[in-house]
Amino acid sequence: MASAKFSARLRRSRSVKVLRQPAARSRHSPLELGYPRSGHSSILFRMDLRERLQNWSASSRRVFLSSMLLLLCAAVAPAVGSAASCKRISGLAPILKATGAFVGDMHGTVEAPAFVKALTCHLLSSGRTVVLALEYPSNQQQFLGAFLHSHASDPERALLASPFWSRPTQDGRTSRAMLQLLEWVRGQIAGGARVRVVAFGWQPPRGLSGTAGFNARDAAMAARLRQELATLTPREFPIIFTGNVHARRTKRATV
Protein backbone atom coordinates (compact mmCIF):
# COMPACT_ATOMS: atom_id res chain seq x y z
CA MET A 1 0.00 0.00 0.00
CA ALA A 2 2.80 2.37 0.96
CA SER A 3 4.51 1.57 -2.33
CA ALA A 4 1.38 2.43 -4.31
CA LYS A 5 1.01 5.77 -2.50
CA PHE A 6 4.62 6.63 -3.17
CA SER A 7 4.32 5.75 -6.87
CA ALA A 8 1.26 7.99 -7.18
CA ARG A 9 3.10 10.78 -5.44
CA LEU A 10 6.11 10.28 -7.69
CA ARG A 11 3.94 10.65 -10.78
CA ARG A 12 2.46 13.89 -9.47
CA SER A 13 5.76 15.48 -8.49
CA ARG A 14 9.17 16.07 -10.02
CA SER A 15 10.71 18.03 -7.12
CA VAL A 16 11.75 17.29 -3.56
CA LYS A 17 10.06 20.41 -2.28
CA VAL A 18 6.61 18.88 -2.82
CA LEU A 19 7.38 16.17 -0.28
CA ARG A 20 9.55 17.93 2.25
CA GLN A 21 9.53 21.69 1.92
CA PRO A 22 6.78 24.29 2.50
CA ALA A 23 5.45 26.14 -0.51
CA ALA A 24 6.85 29.43 0.78
CA ARG A 25 10.37 28.12 0.17
CA SER A 26 9.70 26.47 -3.19
CA ARG A 27 11.80 29.03 -5.00
CA HIS A 28 14.95 27.56 -3.43
CA SER A 29 16.83 24.66 -4.92
CA PRO A 30 17.28 21.39 -2.98
CA LEU A 31 20.96 22.26 -2.61
CA GLU A 32 20.01 25.38 -0.62
CA LEU A 33 17.55 23.45 1.53
CA GLY A 34 19.96 20.62 2.41
CA TYR A 35 20.09 16.96 1.52
CA PRO A 36 16.86 15.03 2.19
CA ARG A 37 17.17 12.09 4.55
CA SER A 38 14.59 9.55 3.40
CA GLY A 39 15.18 7.19 0.48
CA HIS A 40 12.09 8.44 -1.38
CA SER A 41 13.11 12.06 -1.07
CA SER A 42 16.62 11.16 -2.23
CA ILE A 43 15.19 9.79 -5.48
CA LEU A 44 13.24 13.00 -6.07
CA PHE A 45 16.27 15.08 -5.12
CA ARG A 46 18.34 13.40 -7.83
CA MET A 47 15.55 13.90 -10.38
CA ASP A 48 15.23 17.57 -9.47
CA LEU A 49 19.00 18.11 -9.65
CA ARG A 50 19.18 16.41 -13.06
CA GLU A 51 16.40 18.66 -14.42
CA ARG A 52 18.12 21.79 -13.17
CA LEU A 53 21.47 20.77 -14.69
CA GLN A 54 19.75 20.16 -18.02
CA ASN A 55 18.18 23.64 -17.93
CA TRP A 56 21.45 25.39 -17.13
CA SER A 57 23.79 26.58 -19.83
CA ALA A 58 26.93 24.59 -20.59
CA SER A 59 29.12 27.15 -18.82
CA SER A 60 26.92 27.13 -15.71
CA ARG A 61 27.07 23.35 -15.59
CA ARG A 62 30.85 23.42 -15.82
CA VAL A 63 31.11 25.94 -12.97
CA PHE A 64 28.73 23.92 -10.80
CA LEU A 65 30.45 20.59 -11.43
CA SER A 66 33.90 22.13 -10.87
CA SER A 67 32.74 23.52 -7.52
CA MET A 68 31.36 20.15 -6.48
CA LEU A 69 34.66 18.48 -7.45
CA LEU A 70 36.65 20.96 -5.35
CA LEU A 71 34.37 20.31 -2.37
CA LEU A 72 34.86 16.57 -2.79
CA CYS A 73 38.65 16.92 -2.96
CA ALA A 74 38.62 19.06 0.18
CA ALA A 75 36.56 16.44 1.98
CA VAL A 76 39.01 13.62 1.29
CA ALA A 77 42.27 15.57 1.65
CA PRO A 78 44.38 14.90 4.76
CA ALA A 79 43.54 17.22 7.64
CA VAL A 80 46.91 18.93 8.05
CA GLY A 81 47.24 22.38 9.55
CA SER A 82 48.87 25.31 7.76
CA ALA A 83 52.46 26.36 8.35
CA ALA A 84 51.14 29.29 10.38
CA SER A 85 50.00 26.81 13.05
CA CYS A 86 53.54 25.36 13.38
CA LYS A 87 56.10 26.74 15.80
CA ARG A 88 58.59 28.97 14.01
CA ILE A 89 62.02 27.49 13.19
CA SER A 90 64.89 29.82 12.31
CA GLY A 91 66.71 28.72 9.15
CA LEU A 92 63.96 26.32 8.10
CA ALA A 93 64.20 26.87 4.32
CA PRO A 94 67.38 24.80 3.70
CA ILE A 95 65.96 21.92 5.72
CA LEU A 96 62.76 21.83 3.66
CA LYS A 97 64.86 21.58 0.48
CA ALA A 98 66.90 18.66 1.83
CA THR A 99 66.13 14.97 1.37
CA GLY A 100 66.19 14.25 5.11
CA ALA A 101 67.53 15.37 8.46
CA PHE A 102 69.40 13.99 11.45
CA VAL A 103 68.37 15.53 14.76
CA GLY A 104 70.86 14.76 17.52
CA ASP A 105 69.74 15.32 21.09
CA MET A 106 70.84 14.84 24.67
CA HIS A 107 68.25 12.31 25.88
CA GLY A 108 65.85 13.85 28.37
CA THR A 109 65.52 17.43 27.10
CA VAL A 110 62.19 19.12 26.41
CA GLU A 111 63.49 21.28 23.58
CA ALA A 112 64.63 18.50 21.22
CA PRO A 113 61.21 16.73 21.01
CA ALA A 114 59.58 20.15 20.63
CA PHE A 115 61.89 20.93 17.69
CA VAL A 116 61.09 17.58 16.04
CA LYS A 117 57.39 18.30 16.46
CA ALA A 118 57.74 21.74 14.84
CA LEU A 119 59.85 20.36 11.98
CA THR A 120 57.36 17.57 11.34
CA CYS A 121 54.54 20.10 11.36
CA HIS A 122 56.24 22.30 8.73
CA LEU A 123 57.05 19.33 6.52
CA LEU A 124 53.47 18.04 6.63
CA SER A 125 52.18 21.53 5.87
CA SER A 126 54.42 21.64 2.80
CA GLY A 127 52.85 18.45 1.49
CA ARG A 128 55.67 16.06 2.37
CA THR A 129 55.25 12.63 3.92
CA VAL A 130 57.29 12.32 7.10
CA VAL A 131 59.08 9.19 8.31
CA LEU A 132 60.04 9.75 11.93
CA ALA A 133 62.83 7.35 12.90
CA LEU A 134 63.30 7.03 16.66
CA GLU A 135 66.11 5.44 18.65
CA TYR A 136 63.80 2.82 20.11
CA PRO A 137 64.64 -0.90 19.91
CA SER A 138 63.12 -2.37 16.76
CA ASN A 139 61.05 -4.79 18.86
CA GLN A 140 59.07 -1.74 20.03
CA GLN A 141 57.58 -1.25 16.55
CA GLN A 142 54.45 -3.24 17.40
CA PHE A 143 53.83 -1.19 20.55
CA LEU A 144 54.31 2.07 18.66
CA GLY A 145 51.91 0.91 15.96
CA ALA A 146 49.28 -0.13 18.49
CA PHE A 147 49.53 3.26 20.20
CA LEU A 148 49.60 5.45 17.10
CA HIS A 149 46.58 3.77 15.51
CA SER A 150 44.59 3.02 18.66
CA HIS A 151 40.95 4.13 18.93
CA ALA A 152 40.77 3.32 22.64
CA SER A 153 39.99 5.96 25.25
CA ASP A 154 43.42 5.33 26.87
CA PRO A 155 45.83 4.66 23.96
CA GLU A 156 48.84 5.27 26.23
CA ARG A 157 48.17 1.87 27.81
CA ALA A 158 49.42 0.14 24.63
CA LEU A 159 52.68 2.09 24.72
CA LEU A 160 53.33 1.98 28.46
CA ALA A 161 52.76 -1.77 28.48
CA SER A 162 55.96 -2.32 26.49
CA PRO A 163 59.10 -3.51 28.32
CA PHE A 164 61.01 -0.50 26.99
CA TRP A 165 58.68 2.01 28.66
CA SER A 166 58.43 0.04 31.91
CA ARG A 167 62.09 -0.97 32.44
CA PRO A 168 63.61 -0.20 35.85
CA THR A 169 66.35 2.08 34.45
CA GLN A 170 64.93 4.80 32.20
CA ASP A 171 66.55 7.44 30.03
CA GLY A 172 65.23 10.44 28.16
CA ARG A 173 63.93 8.38 25.25
CA THR A 174 60.90 7.57 27.39
CA SER A 175 60.45 11.02 28.90
CA ARG A 176 57.18 12.91 29.25
CA ALA A 177 58.30 15.18 26.40
CA MET A 178 58.75 12.16 24.13
CA LEU A 179 55.33 10.84 25.10
CA GLN A 180 53.83 14.24 24.25
CA LEU A 181 55.57 14.15 20.86
CA LEU A 182 54.14 10.71 20.13
CA GLU A 183 50.69 11.80 21.28
CA TRP A 184 50.86 14.74 18.87
CA VAL A 185 51.94 12.43 16.03
CA ARG A 186 49.04 10.14 16.88
CA GLY A 187 46.64 13.07 16.59
CA GLN A 188 48.10 14.01 13.20
CA ILE A 189 47.68 10.45 11.93
CA ALA A 190 44.08 10.39 13.17
CA GLY A 191 43.49 13.60 11.20
CA GLY A 192 44.80 12.06 7.99
CA ALA A 193 48.40 13.31 8.01
CA ARG A 194 50.96 11.23 6.14
CA VAL A 195 53.44 10.39 8.87
CA ARG A 196 54.78 7.11 10.18
CA VAL A 197 57.13 6.21 12.97
CA VAL A 198 59.99 3.72 12.67
CA ALA A 199 61.93 2.17 15.55
CA PHE A 200 65.54 1.65 14.41
CA GLY A 201 67.37 1.12 17.71
CA TRP A 202 69.26 -1.99 18.79
CA GLN A 203 70.10 -3.22 22.25
CA PRO A 204 73.41 -5.11 22.51
CA PRO A 205 73.23 -8.48 24.22
CA ARG A 206 74.50 -8.92 27.75
CA GLY A 207 78.23 -9.35 27.93
CA LEU A 208 78.85 -6.95 25.06
CA SER A 209 79.68 -3.60 26.60
CA GLY A 210 82.17 -0.76 26.41
CA THR A 211 83.55 0.28 23.04
CA ALA A 212 82.70 -3.06 21.44
CA GLY A 213 79.09 -2.82 22.53
CA PHE A 214 78.81 0.82 21.42
CA ASN A 215 80.30 0.13 17.99
CA ALA A 216 78.13 -2.95 17.49
CA ARG A 217 75.04 -0.93 18.40
CA ASP A 218 75.93 1.88 16.00
CA ALA A 219 76.57 -0.61 13.19
CA ALA A 220 73.25 -2.36 13.78
CA MET A 221 71.32 0.93 13.85
CA ALA A 222 73.06 2.14 10.70
CA ALA A 223 72.12 -1.08 8.90
CA ARG A 224 68.50 -0.71 10.01
CA LEU A 225 68.41 2.88 8.78
CA ARG A 226 69.93 1.99 5.42
CA GLN A 227 67.28 -0.68 4.99
CA GLU A 228 64.52 1.81 5.77
CA LEU A 229 65.93 4.63 3.65
CA ALA A 230 66.24 2.34 0.64
CA THR A 231 62.44 1.94 0.58
CA LEU A 232 61.55 5.64 0.75
CA THR A 233 59.71 7.41 -2.06
CA PRO A 234 60.83 10.87 -3.29
CA ARG A 235 58.02 12.55 -1.33
CA GLU A 236 58.99 10.91 1.97
CA PHE A 237 61.20 12.98 4.25
CA PRO A 238 63.05 11.05 6.98
CA ILE A 239 63.70 12.70 10.34
CA ILE A 240 66.24 10.56 12.20
CA PHE A 241 65.92 11.50 15.86
CA THR A 242 68.75 9.99 17.86
CA GLY A 243 71.38 10.72 20.47
CA ASN A 244 73.90 13.35 19.44
CA VAL A 245 76.83 10.94 19.78
CA HIS A 246 75.23 8.59 17.23
CA ALA A 247 74.46 11.47 14.86
CA ARG A 248 77.88 13.11 14.93
CA ARG A 249 79.86 13.34 11.70
CA THR A 250 83.27 12.80 13.25
CA LYS A 251 84.51 9.42 14.41
CA ARG A 252 84.17 8.77 18.11
CA ALA A 253 87.43 8.52 19.98
CA THR A 254 88.33 5.07 21.27
CA VAL A 255 87.96 4.67 25.04
Image: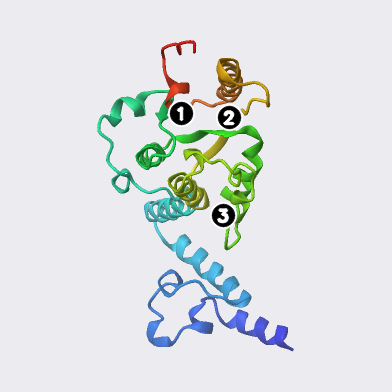
Q: Amino acid at mark 2?
A: Gly
Q: Earlier in the sequence, mark 2 or mark 1?
A: 2
| Few, some or many residues within 10 Å of mark 2 (<14, 14–19, 20+) | many
Q: Which residue matches tag 3?
A: 156
Residue contact at pointers 3 and 2, CB within 8 angstroms? no
Residue at (72%, 83%) from the top-left corner?
A: 3
Q: Is residue 145 above or below residue 21?
A: above
Single out the mark in the foreground, 3 or 1. 1
Q: Residue at 30% x, 44% y: name it.
A: 87
Residue 214 point in image, percent of width and height: 56, 20
Q: Earlier in the sequence, mark 3 or mark 2?
A: 3
User: What is the image's colouring?
Assistant: rainbow
Mark 3 to mark 1 CA distance (whole Å): 24 Å
Q: Earlier in the sequence, mark 3 or mark 1?
A: 3
* Inter-mark Cα distance, 2 to 1: 11 Å
Residue under numbered circle 1: 243
- Which amino acid, by three-letter code, is at mark 1? Gly
